Image: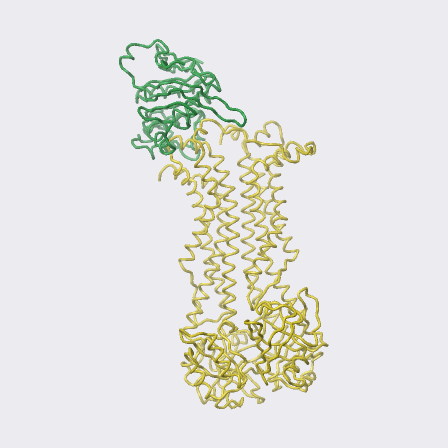
Amino acid sequence: MDSGLTAGSAPQPAEESAGPEAVLRVRGVSKVHHMGEIDVHALRGVDLDLYAGEIAVLLGPSGSGKSTLLNILGGLDHPTAGSVRHYDEELTTLDDARLTRYRRECVGFVFQFYNLIPSLTARENVALVTDIASNPMRPEEALGLVDLANRLDHFPAQLSGGEQQRVAIARAIAKRPEVLLCDEPTGALDAHTGILVLEVIGRINRELGTTTALITHNAVISEMADRVISLSGGEITGVRRNGKKVAPKDLAW
Amino acid sequence: MNALDRKLFRDLSRMKGQALAIALVMGSGIAIYVMSAAAVESLESARSAYYDKCRFAQAFTHLKRAPNALVARIAEIPGVSQVDARIVVDVVLDAPGTPEPVTGRLISLPKGLHEGLNTLHLRKGRFIEPGRRGEAVVSEPFAEANGIGPGDRVRAVINGRLDYLHIVGVGISPEYIYQIRPGELLPDDKRFGVFWMDYEELAPAYDLDGAFNDVALTLAPDANEAEVLQHLDNLTERYGGLGAYGRDEQLSHRLISDEIQQLRATAVITPSIFLAVAAFIINVAMSRLVNTQREQIAALKAFGYTRREVGLHYLKLVLMIAVIGACIGSAAGIWLGNSLTDIYAQYFRFPSFEYHISSKAIFLAFFFAAAMSVLGTIGTVLRAMMLPPAEAMHPEAPGIYHQTFIERIGRRGMFSPPTIMILRQLQRRPVRAVLSCLGMAFSVALLVIGNFTVDIVNYTIDFQFFRTQRQDMTLTLVESRSLRGFHEIARLPGVTRAEPFRSAAVRLRLGHRSRRTAIMGLPQERTLYRLLDVDEREVAIPPSGIMMSEKLAEILGARIGDTVTVEVMEGERPVREVRITGLIRDFSGTSAYMDIHALNAMLSEGDVVSGAFLTTDATKLPALYKEIKETPLIAGASLKKAALVSFRETLAKNLLITTLFYVIFSCIVTFGVAYNSIEVTLSERSRELATLRVIGFTHAETSYILLGEITILTLAAIPLGLALGWALAALTVKALATETQRFPLVIESSTYAFAAVTVLLATAASALGARRKLKRLSLVAVLKARD
């Protein structure tokens, strides 16, 4: 894998001249899981940059290593080898406390299964994050952004899957993160609901300029991205820059 | 309140059944601790205030007769602060409304009523006025038991002459906070009373003009008690001194001290067990909670919550349960302590017995509850803290199961898949299975030790009153008399059998250890007063040598075959070496026994008796009682049946109340443990069980999987718990043993059965509840939900 991933697919001069800054810079990252007697190579020397304000879709089948990569980007996991830089800060050498601070201040997570706290209402689930963030929006505001202003006091069990995922997105963006990492955000949703969720993610990216990395195994979704990074067998097999982003509502799967 | 704390409260309210069960278990332990601590504090503060106020003496001795001039010499002993010389005699009384003879202890009061030691605290009426004939202040328990008070008269044979005691007041004394006749096991307030009278009246009646027969004294702050006692013995020896002793051998003082010591033991042992059980079950509950919330934990970490914040979150939950438990326990303990103090107030007479509980005890209660819960859950909390956040990104991998031992040895075919599931589940979480089982075993054990006090009391009473001391009545003579006195007693109406005994005050020495006690001389031919050896077989008294209670041997560090020095404290005061020929089982006091002839020979006396054990013809009792009251040579009568009846009316009832407390608490623990175990299993396996229902298993079959585990754990816990109960009972018996009182390790099979059945019932009740919950389980919802 060459280091010119950023140029892996016909770069557009306009963007080049704007000089998008790499928020996260991944170099030669490998991850080996030791499963008893065997070693599983989840990532094999991955190089990747995430640019400010873009939507990047990591596309790949199950087991391609995309979740592992996302975890490493989000400071949830350490790579076995390689370097991950957040601007000038090397994440791989940070201890748990510093990684926690990185997550606390810079990263918003959206999980496939929402991971809402069932005992807390929508508003309180968002407050969970705003309580510890330095410059958060109000939970109501964040929920307004995901069109849930009228569901503030509902518990997760009283919300549909799509609504739950939107609460999760509100929770992730309420701290105004630099990076929003979404792990199969539509994986548990039907097409119609999934599109609603993707629209929210797209809008947040547009309106707040949040750098967004989104994992999916659904090739259709990649059409809403600025760039599509394909993974397979723990390696990046291709990077494609979309000439024209398709609005989520026009996606069809 | 921040969102994480909100989650805390919601989690708590979701697991409220479990939390309450744990809090109640904890609260039960705390209640017993607070109750015991409060009783200890109340007793100690009341006693020390009383001792100070009424100048309770620190050393005592009784003698035959000494001139008043000796008082000044006693006062000169270095270390003596104040001396009180007085007359103390026992007489037989006739109290109105009480057919049986009553033993009265007459004590002379000093001229200046408030100057002496052991001063009287007046409850009713007035003090005696010098010069007025026959006036007496009576002890409160006796007055109450007999319904007498100022204005009443009690007929007495005072030194051979019939006389009346005119009650002018009712009082209490620090010497008789616990009023019990020396040598008795149980108090008998109806038939033993203390009377305080004018010295000028008692002295001529007992030929003690210008003399005294009893000394009480206080010590200077820097005094060496042992030296003072030695000096006192030296001074009183030629006046028939029976040996000086300090407060530690003063009967009332020692009984209260023993009670306090036992309360202290109770305050430690029982609550420790309860809190240990609480720690087990809170561990199981929290470990389950953390398991089911692992994705939430991981998400929290992904959002940037620190390990510390996550750990603190769960620790707060634990502490909230502990605080609820401590609050319930302290409140219950304070309330129960009050009732316990009321019970004590019936036996221990203080001028004011105020209920006292310090903030320190309450603080300790909260501290112990918190410490034990944290101790029980620290591993789980650490696990939550260390949970790698990346876990949030994927659902929990299926648990790793292995073939069980039974399957590996090739017996798989014997079991259905559901049974295999149960066995593998147990094997997968062996630590939790062991903890659940231990929790249950401890609750069985608690039920055993909650009930076995009743077994002990029944056994002791049977032992003491029916197997060893089988007389109906014991008569004591004013002074040791020749056999003629005995024959006189034997001829009294209604006496069906009489056996003499000789009692001699002695000090026994072995090496540097010594003990003041009495040797009882018994005839070879006897059926009433039996001696049992350590295996509880009847033993004959050897013609020579001495037998003693196991406890006395322990105090002296003596073994069979050792030779002890016997210093006789009466008569010629001979000193002899006697070989120990056997040990006797008994549960109170420090007795020693010899053949009556051997004892008399040692005393260089002929056939002398101190009293007799009698069996009586119940139909002729009124005549017998009348004779006893009018026979001058009888100093005291102790009636076994009367004492037993009054015991069953009072002490036994109170014992039953306290036992009931413990049993209720133990039942709470049992239900708490069973309920908790089932709740945990249900919440962990509901998804699995719902899946089974969906693929066609019946409700009965899924119930079997749910309840099989708890059934196996319960069945394993019962024998373990019974053994544990036995061990804890042994520990309790050891911890509660004092010199005045010891307890046999006796556990009736009914106690074991009660414990086992209660645990089975508690499990069954919890299981039925869980089964109903399982039936109501919405299959669709369970399968959809991921938590």
Classify A143 as above or below B483.
above
Residue B516 lies, in percent from the top left, at: 56, 75
- Report if residue B274 is visible in the image: yes
The answer to which quarter of the image holds residue B50 is bottom left
Q: Nearer the viewer, residue B65 or B647?
A: B65
Give the answer, above or below, for where A56 lies relative to B591: above
- Color used for chain A? green
Q: How is the image coloured?
A: by chain
The residue positioned farthest toward the right in the image shown: B525
Quadrant of the snapshot with the N terminus of chain B: top left
Residue B218 location, quadrant:
bottom left
Q: Nearer the viewer, residue B214 or B635?
A: B214
In percent of width and height, residue B207 lies at 53, 90
Q: Quadrant of residue B119?
A: bottom left
Q: Is residue B340 above or below residue B133?
A: above
* Residue B571 visible: no
The chain drawn in yellow is B
Question: Which of A138/B749 is in front?
Answer: B749
Q: In the displayed orientation, state which residue is furthest to the left.
A: A17
Residue B369, how many percent across, how many down?
46, 50
* Residue found at x 60% / y 82%: B574
Which residue is painted at 63% across and 50% down in the image? B757
- Total residue callouts: 0
Q: Is residue A129 left or right of residue B27?
A: left
Which residue lies most toward the front here? B511
Query: Could you say where residue B308 lies in the image, as x and y percent from the top left?
Result: 39, 38
